[in-house]
Image (spheres, rainbow, N blue to C red):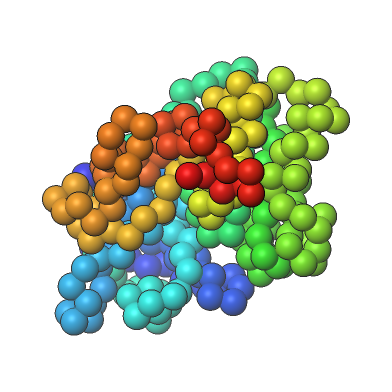
Amino acid sequence: MFLEDVKVIENIQIADNYYLMRVEGTKIPQHSKPGQFFMLQCKDNSKVLRRPISLHNVDGNILEFYYEALGKGTKEFTRLSIGETINIQGPLGNGYDTDLKGKNIVVIGGGMGMAPIKYLIKDLKDNNDITFIGGGRNAGAVKIIEKFDFKNIQLKVATDDGSVGIKGNTVDILKKILKDENKNIDIIYTCGPHPMMEAVAKVAQENNIRCQISLEERMACGIKACVGCSILTKKGMKKVCYDGPVFESTDIVDVDVVDPNGGCK
């Protein structure tokens, strides 16, 4: 884990409240892996706590962060200009297990869950067959995937309003792949809204497919010093910042207790 002042080299609005920031680091990039996150420091001293932001991509000594400006801290990030510096802490968390070769892989990202997906696909695509399913509320929510490299990747997109891709959701597409393509999927990676990941995990478990999910929780410290992001898993209490944010879906979701209305108890 490093603390470093990095230089902003790009900070652009992608759509609505979605932004992409690229920073230039020194020691950090080569120690980062897909699924990890960083704590970004605000310059306004009234905002004491850093903001956890997923690592979107690594390109040489460049780190990319895809973030949504919702609160005062992330809105401050949108005002950072090229050449300014920001202090970042990381990489933090465990990241996805990407030590795989020759596997059939499905990657599913929903909305802001697209944040760790670009780097994940980049890390996996040279050695595996990948289908990426992206989804969101509307065209703005999936616009970031225009910046992904989909060479040799099968791309499927769904939006709630049908403005891009099919009108539906990512789970519909996953079920259709399993039903119509008779594809032997080795592993599913997913990140997005909790209900989406619960549904994906349920489909995975019903079809005996390994599934890794990346959870998002409110974090104060990001380094397991507090209990702000503790969750109850089938293996006891875990801290999302330290034990995750990536978990095996079987540690989180139990299909035996999924209620008939679609939610997980």
Vertical relation: 40 (above or below) 184 = below
Residue 177 shows up from this direction: yes
Give the left or right position of residue 245, taking residue 100 as reference: left
Q: How many marks?
A: 0
User: At which x and y percent is residue 211?
Assistant: 53, 31
Vertical relation: 69 (above or below) 263 = below
User: At which x and y percent is residue 231?
Assistant: 32, 46
User: At which x and y percent is residue 224?
Assistant: 19, 47
Q: Residue furthest right?
A: 180
Which residue does the image show at 48% across and 44% down from the upper left?
265
Which residue does the image show at 76% across and 23% down from the upper left?
183
Where the N terminus falls, by quadrant? top left
Q: Residue furthest left?
A: 225
Q: Nearer the viewer, residue 6 or 157?
A: 157
Give the left or right position of residue 177, taking residue 83 as reference: right
Vertical relation: 141 (above or below) 240 = below
Q: Residue furthest front?
A: 260
Give the left or right position of residue 44, taking residue 193 as reference: left
Q: Nearer the viewer, residue 89 or 218?
A: 218
Which residue does the image show at 46% across and 65% down from the upper left?
67
Vertical relation: 7 (above or below) 151 = below
User: At which x and y percent is residue 18?
Assistant: 54, 70
Quarter of the rendering containing residue 180: top right
Q: Nearer the viewer, residue 199 or 70?
A: 199
Give the left or right position of residue 182, taking residue 48 as reference: right
Residue 117 shows up from this direction: no
Which residue does the image show at 80% across and 23% down from the upper left?
182
